[in-house]
């Protein structure tokens, strides 16, 4: 099986549920406070491992209790964290998340994630070879992401970019991306187009050959080899918390491709894995195992 290299962020998510989003100057009562492991890079690596992938994560945490807890949790999930470094003088990344009406709003303090530099990318990719996969996102410095994509492309790796949170500057590096996985908002920010088909055509003009636009409850839209395919969302009984659904999708995508499954089978699998994620609270805690996804899919 091809190895998966995830370069990205690790955050401790501080989560509280609220009946609504408070207005400016307003204080409201929430409930169900949780501190739980998150960060887009770490979530995607955890998804890869829980779904059966061979995954190494590169990133940075601070020299604090959150950093220790994040690494322990990832190791327990099966992620190789040898390339997660402790950045002295920085705090571990923190995400403050408010959940209201099943949706989330997130404020980030990147902390040590901002110290992930090209030396870290080099160290991670030292163990990579042709055919392996690089999966990355934008919660670490964009220059590091660009460098890693370029280096991975030069090693003939398959590169997957989840441009989240979206930064327009990432278009400078799209020539090194094999598969881009934005959500609708990110697609609009990258292309200036609010219609998904128009956004896809804009990215095609920029040389992207394969893209998968995740569309929440509407499912996904995939463009590859000149064709656009829509896939509806897998149905679940109740949406509890959407945090990490996109990350689970990206991790499952990487695992399917690492196992040489067809893109369409991989998308179906990733779609079901992401759907299961929204049925539980938390980020890494809500990511299903391979067995859970297999059981879920067997019902359809
Ligand atoms: O994608 C979800 C993640 O975004 C959360 O775990 C939070 O840490 C933020 O990075």
Image: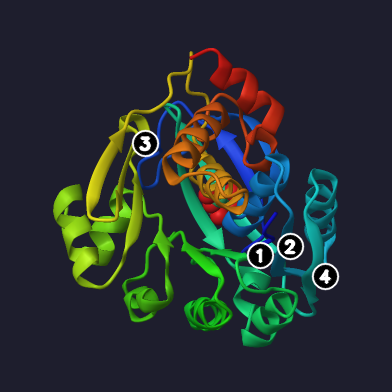
Badge 1 density bin: few <14, some 14–19, many ≥20, Cα 10 Å: many
First-in-chain label (3 vs 4): 4
Q: Image quadrant for the N terminus?
A: bottom right
Q: Which residue is mark 4?
A: 63
Residue 156: % across, % down: 55, 76
- Which residue is at a point 35% across and 41% down the rendered structure image? 23
Distance, label 2 to label 1, CA atoms, is: 5 Å
Element marked by disc 1 = strand
First-in-chain label (2 vs 1): 1
Badge 2 density bin: few <14, some 14–19, many ≥20, Cα 10 Å: many
Q: Quadrant of residue 110?
A: bottom right
| Marks 2 and 1 in Cβ contact (< 8 Å) | yes
The mark total stands at 4
Q: Which residue is mark 3?
A: 216
Q: Is 56 on the left-hand or right-hand side of 94?
A: right
First-in-chain label (3 vs 2): 2
First-in-chain label (4 vs 2): 2
Distance, label 3 to label 2, CA atoms, is: 28 Å
Q: Which residue is mark 2?
A: 56
First-in-chain label (1 vs 3): 1
| Marks 1 and 4 in Cβ contact (< 8 Å) | no
Distance, label 4 to label 2, CA atoms, is: 21 Å
């Amino acid at each position: 099986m091809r190895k998966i290299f995830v370069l990205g962020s690790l955050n401790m998510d501080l989560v509280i549920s609220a009946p609504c989003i408070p207005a400016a100057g307003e204080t409201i009562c929430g409930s169900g406070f949780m501190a739980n492991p998150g960060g887009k890079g770490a979530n995607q690596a955890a998804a890869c491992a829980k779904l059966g992938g061979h995954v190494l994560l590169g990133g940075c945490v601070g020299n604090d209790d959150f950093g220790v807890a994040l690494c322990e949790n990832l190791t327990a999930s099966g992620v190789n964290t040898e390339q997660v470094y402790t950045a002295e003088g920085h705090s571990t990344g923190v995400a403050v998340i408010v959940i209201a009406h099943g949706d989330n709003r997130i404020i980030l303090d990147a902390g040590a994630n901002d110290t992930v530099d090209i030396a870290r990318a080099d160290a991670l990719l030292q163990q990579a070879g042709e055919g392996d996969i690089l999966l990355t996102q934008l919660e670490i410095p964009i220059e590091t992401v660009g460098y890693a994509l370029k280096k991975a492309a030069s090693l003939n790796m398959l590169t997957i970019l989840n441009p989240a949170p979206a930064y327009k500057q990432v278009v400078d590096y799209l020539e090194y991306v094999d598969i881009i996985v934005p959500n609708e908002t990110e697609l609009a920010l990258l292309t200036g187009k609010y219609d998904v088909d128009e956004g896809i055509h804009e990215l095609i003009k920029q040389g992207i050959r394969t893209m998968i636009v995740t569309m929440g409850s509407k499912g996904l839209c995939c463009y590859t080899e000149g064709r656009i395919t829509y896939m509806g969302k897998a149905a679940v009984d109740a949406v509890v918390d959407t945090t990490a659904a996109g990350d689970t999708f990206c991790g499952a995508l990487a695992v399917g491709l690492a196992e040489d499954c067809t893109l369409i089978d991989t998308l179906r699998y990733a779609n079901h894995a992401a759907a299961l994620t929204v049925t539980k609270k938390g980020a890494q805690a809500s990511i299903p195992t391979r067995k859970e996804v297999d059981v879920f899919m067997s019902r359809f």
